[in-house]
Image (cartoon, rainbow, N blue to C red):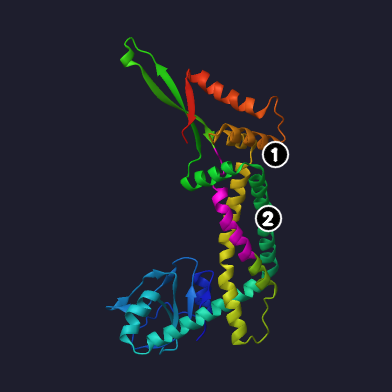
């Protein structure tokens, strides 16, 4: 009895185990399972005899089974567990034992692959840590430069998924009769803040950094002797479990980098002074963005903010404006 094999096609499987396509398997002629198999596609045909004729169900996973004539046949998982094991005592125990061996074999194969690709995994972890350090440094710099009120607003906007910067214009409509006069409010969208999610993702990325550092340390010391003890195998199995998180972390880090890149585009940053309402904080934000992007202002930041507000009022003929969201 051997463990499950991943076979590249049905022809190889039949040749490897000398499978007889003419035979069938029943509860009466069953002897023992030889191995489990897994094919790339459902090309194997089940040879279990059901109601007087071969099952014939095409399948991808199954077992090579020896029958009392000495021949080997194929049986799919469905018939193996739901038919043969019910009709023949001891079959389920044989299959379960084979499956357990299979799981052990697959884990050992994954451990072997992990150790073979150790250098590649270490490079991936190193690259992720470098990316995390660089992107978090960008946000830390901005957090230091920008007024607290703006940073707080960015977090709140990100939590509420509110990227649109909208100002509301008050337009006075004079009627013939004084009592018919009215003030209407018209929204003006200044734009959308791109990459806003990077602010709420930063704490998770910081946790990823800690996980990667621990993983790097464990991977560095990972090894297996020629005759590994049970303790060694258990330690490597635990490392395998933790390594499964690497792909997810890498995906999160790539998304985070993309969000930061979009956020720090100059046109995007120039929206920030208009994402809050306080005039002084808006002016301080404009100055910070001007310094960060190396964009000289041709007048004071307060005059620039006033020009922005005036342009909106003139565009709509508004008597006043206020930040809506």
Looking at the image, which residue sits at the far top?
176
Q: Is residue 47 above or below residue 322?
A: below
Separation (CA) of disc 2 from disc 1? 19 Å
The image position of residue 125, as x and y in percent, is: 66, 63
Report the residue at 35% width, 84% height from top: 85
Start and end of the magenta stretch? Answer: 193-212
Disc 1 secondary structure class: helix
The image position of residue 13, as x and y in percent, is: 51, 75
Residue pointed to by mark 1: 292
Q: How would you classify the magenta stretch by its main secondary structure?
A: helix
The image position of residue 90, as x and y in percent, is: 37, 89
State if disc 1 and disc 2 touch (CB < 8 Å): no
Residue 66 can be seen, yes or no = no
Magenta span includes 49: no
Q: Is residue 199 above or below residue 15?
A: above
- Which of the pair 265/147 is nearer the observer? 147
- Which of the pair 42/78 is nearer the observer? 78
Q: Is residue 115 above or below residue 208?
A: below
Residue 304 can be seen, yes or no = yes
The image position of residue 227, as x and y in percent, is: 65, 87
Disc 2 secondary structure class: helix
Label number found at residue 133: 2
Binning the other alpha carbons within 10 Å of mark 2 as few (below 14), some (14 to 19) or many (20 upward) gives some
Judged left or right of residue 13, residue 67 is left
Q: Is residue 256 above or below residue 272?
A: below
Q: For residue 236, what is the image quadrant?
A: bottom right
Label number found at residue 3: none
Binning the other alpha carbons within 10 Å of mark 1 as few (below 14), some (14 to 19) or many (20 upward) gives some
Q: For residue 203, what is the image quadrant?
A: bottom right
Judged left or right of residue 295, residue 28 is left
Sequence-earlier tag: 2 or 1:
2
Magenta span includes 196: yes
């Amino acid at each position: 009895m051997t463990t499950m094999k991943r076979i590249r096609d049905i022809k190889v499987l039949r040749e490897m185990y000398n499978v007889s396509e003419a035979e069938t398997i029943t509860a009466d002629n069953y002897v023992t399972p030889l191995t489990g198999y897994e094919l790339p596609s459902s090309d194997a045909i089940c040879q279990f005899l059901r109601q007087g004729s071969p099952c014939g169900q095409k399948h991808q996973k199954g077992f090579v089974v020896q029958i009392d004539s000495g021949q080997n046949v194929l049986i799919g998982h469905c018939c193996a567990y739901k038919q043969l094991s019910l009709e023949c005592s001891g079959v389920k125990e044989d299959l379960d034992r084979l499956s357990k061996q299979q799981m052990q074999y697959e884990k050992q194969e994954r451990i072997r692959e992990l150790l073979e690709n150790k250098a590649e995994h270490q490079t991936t972890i190193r690259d992720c840590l470098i990316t995390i350090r660089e992107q978090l440094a960008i946000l830390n710099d901005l957090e230091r430069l920008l007024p607290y009120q703006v940073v707080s607003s960015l977090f709140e906007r990100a939590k509420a998924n509110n990227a649109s910067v909208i100002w509301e214009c008050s337009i006075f409509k004079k009627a013939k009769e004084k009592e018919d006069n009215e003030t209407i409010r018209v929204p003006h969208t200044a734009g959308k803040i791109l990459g806003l999610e990077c602010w709420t993702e930063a704490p998770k990325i910081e946790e990823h950094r800690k996980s990667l550092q621990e993983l790097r340390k464990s991977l560095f010391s990972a090894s297996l002797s020629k005759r590994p003890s049970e303790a060694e195998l258990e330690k490597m199995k635990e490392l395998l479990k933790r390594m499964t998180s690497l792909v997810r972390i890498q995906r999160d880090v790539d998304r985070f980098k993309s969000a930061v890149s979009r956020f720090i585009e100059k046109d995007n940053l120039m929206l920030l002074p208009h994402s809050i309402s306080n005039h002084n904080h808006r002016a301080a934000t404009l100055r910070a963005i001007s310094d960060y992007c190396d964009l000289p202002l041709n007048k004071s930041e307060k005059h620039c903010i006033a020009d922005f507000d005036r342009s909106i009022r003139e565009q709509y003929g508004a008597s006043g404006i206020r930040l809506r969201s």
